[in-house]
């Protein structure tokens, strides 16, 4: 990669976000600052221990608040006043809630624990949502928690406005990780632009012996994606492509809750049958919420929620994936036109948005295995999947 000022600015921005993610996952405090100089301290609710919380309370310049998403707040039965709920298009915006002294932060996380009257335990401790002092910071803090594959709930400690750029120096003095909110917003797209191929090996696969695996890594050492190239690609013609999102349970363990295992193996078999093509194996487990959160969503599905509602009950969107890394890898391989094996119109729309022409859609669906009927039905009826 070139060391031009633009590239080094990109590299340092993604590196700052990656450091913040590691810090949140280990229960540390991150300093966030927006372009107007507003700042705050952030701890992920899921990893918030008593020492970090005490430190945040000591450093913050007003009382800490709890921030989660509207869907999570609604899932625990919280009433959201219309002036806070936001309009259309802001369906899952961050919701700020006062955090009275002594209230355990994790009340927001305990899924569906109710008291004897059926009221969610969180409501016993938490009052109605309040207006956020800096909505952009709340949004960036929630985004960080999601990128760290944690539940979208954070403790936020407001800081006074910072007219110059002193906040970064202050963070350094306090030995705290600092990140600009603007760098969080575009992180996944920016990181995808830094993807570089770092390994390539011939790996004969059952039914596709002429296969190579190419590994791609972003400059911050974050999520690595793979391209499984079968046969010899001719980029002058639309190339047969499958975008496969990682599914540990389906791909590796043969789980029958989903259709990923059969989709993975059949895609490779079909590509081999047609002579050549590429399967992109994307590190976006659980439609982008991570394996742990997917298992939490499965728990909710065992209680009767469908795959979309379960995501939303946890506070996520139904699908958190972006396909910018896929588009970058295709372009770097010289592939601009594809025949895409999918039933998901969002994959087509996003690839086109990122500059890849989808010349044709190739259907890629399989009969139910006796365990995933509801899952397949929900994808067709609620996620707009084409069958
Ligand atoms: N959150 C969540 N993720 C799931 C669930 N079941 C499967 N997944 C994830 O969904 C992704 C699989 O989706 P894909 O098969 O790539 O995509 P799709 O949206 O079904 O679209 P096509 O298969 O291309 O038609 C993987 O990351 C799985 O881990 C679930 O119940 N909840
Ligand atoms: Zn799966």
Image (tube, rainbow, N blue to C red):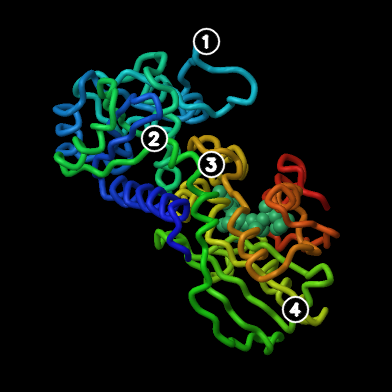
Closer to the eye: label 4 or 3: 4
Q: Is residue 5 left or right of residue 33?
A: right
User: How much space separates mark 4 and mark 3, taking CA atoms?
Assistant: 46 Å
Q: Earlier in the sequence, mark 4 or mark 3?
A: 4
Residue 211 location, quadrant: bottom right
Count of labels shown? 4
Residue 372 in view (yes/no): no
Residue 212 location, quadrant: bottom right
**Whether label 2 touches label 4, CB < 8 Å:** no
Which residue is at the far front?
4
Q: Earlier in the sequence, mark 1 or mark 2?
A: 1
Rendered image: mark on residue 186 = none
- In the displayed structure, would residue 173 be above or below residue 254? above
Determine whether the residue tagged by mark 2 lies in a helix, strand or loop. helix
Mark 4 burial class by Cα count in 10 Å: few <14, some 14-19, many 20+:
some
Residue at image point 34% right, 32% down = 33
Residue on which the image places disc 2? 141
Determine whether the residue tagged by mark 4 lies in a helix, strand or loop. loop
User: How much space separates mark 2 and mark 3, taking CA atoms?
Assistant: 30 Å
Residue on which the image places disc 1? 83
**Whether label 2 touches label 3, CB < 8 Å:** no
Residue on which the image places disc 3? 303
Residue on which the image places disc 4? 233
Task: Give how far across and how far down residue 151 sits, in percent.
Answer: 42, 41
- In the displayed structure, would residue 285 be above or below residue 174? below
Q: Is residue 314 left or right of residue 103?
A: right
């Amino acid at each position: 990669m070139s060391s031009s000022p633009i590239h080094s600015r990109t590299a340092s921005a993604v590196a700052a976000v990656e450091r913040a993610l590691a810090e949140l996952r280990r229960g540390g405090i991150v300093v966030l600052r927006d372009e107007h100089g507003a700042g705050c301290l952030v701890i992920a609710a899921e990893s918030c221990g008593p020492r970090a919380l005490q430190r945040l309370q000591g450093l913050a310049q007003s009382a800490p608040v709890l921030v989660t998403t509207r869907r999570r707040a609604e899932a625990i039965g919280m009433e959201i006043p219309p002036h806070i709920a936001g309009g259309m298009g802001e369906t899952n915006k961050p919701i700020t809630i006062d955090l009275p002294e002594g209230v355990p932060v994790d009340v927001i996380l305990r899924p569906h624990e109710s008291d004897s009257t059926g009221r969610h335990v969180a409501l016993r401790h938490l009052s109605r949502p309040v207006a956020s002092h800096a909505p952009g910071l709340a949004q960036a803090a929630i985004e960080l928690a999601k990128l760290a594959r944690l539940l979208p709930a954070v403790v936020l400690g407001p800081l006074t406005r910072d007219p110059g750029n002193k906040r970064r120096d202050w963070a350094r003095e306090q030995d705290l990780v600092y990140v600009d909110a603007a760098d969080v917003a575009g992180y996944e797209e920016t990181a995808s632009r830094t993807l570089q191929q770092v390994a390539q090996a011939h790996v004969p696969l059952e039914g596709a012996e002429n296969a190579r695996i190419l590994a791609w890594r972003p400059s911050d050492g974050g999520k690595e994606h793979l391209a499984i190239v079968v046969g010899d690609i001719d980029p002058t013609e639309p190339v047969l492509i499958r975008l496969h999102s990682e599914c540990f349970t389906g791909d590796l363990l043969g789980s029958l809750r989903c259709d990923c295992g059969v989709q993975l193996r059949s895609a490779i078999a079909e590509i081999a049958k047609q002579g050549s093509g590429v399967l992109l194996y994307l590190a976006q487990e659980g439609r982008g919420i991570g394996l742990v959160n997917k298992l939490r969503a499965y728990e909710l599905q065992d209680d009767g929620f469908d795959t979309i509602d379960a995501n939303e009950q946890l506070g996520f969107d139904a699908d958190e994936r972006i396909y910018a890394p896929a588009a970058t890898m295709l372009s770097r391989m010289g592939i601009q036109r594809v025949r895409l094996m999918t039933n998901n119109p969002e994959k087509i729309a996003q690839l086109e948005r990122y500059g890849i022409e989808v010349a044709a859609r190739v259907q890629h669906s399989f009969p139910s295995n006796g365990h995933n009927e509801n899952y397949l039905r929900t994808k067709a009826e609620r996620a707009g999947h084409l069958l």
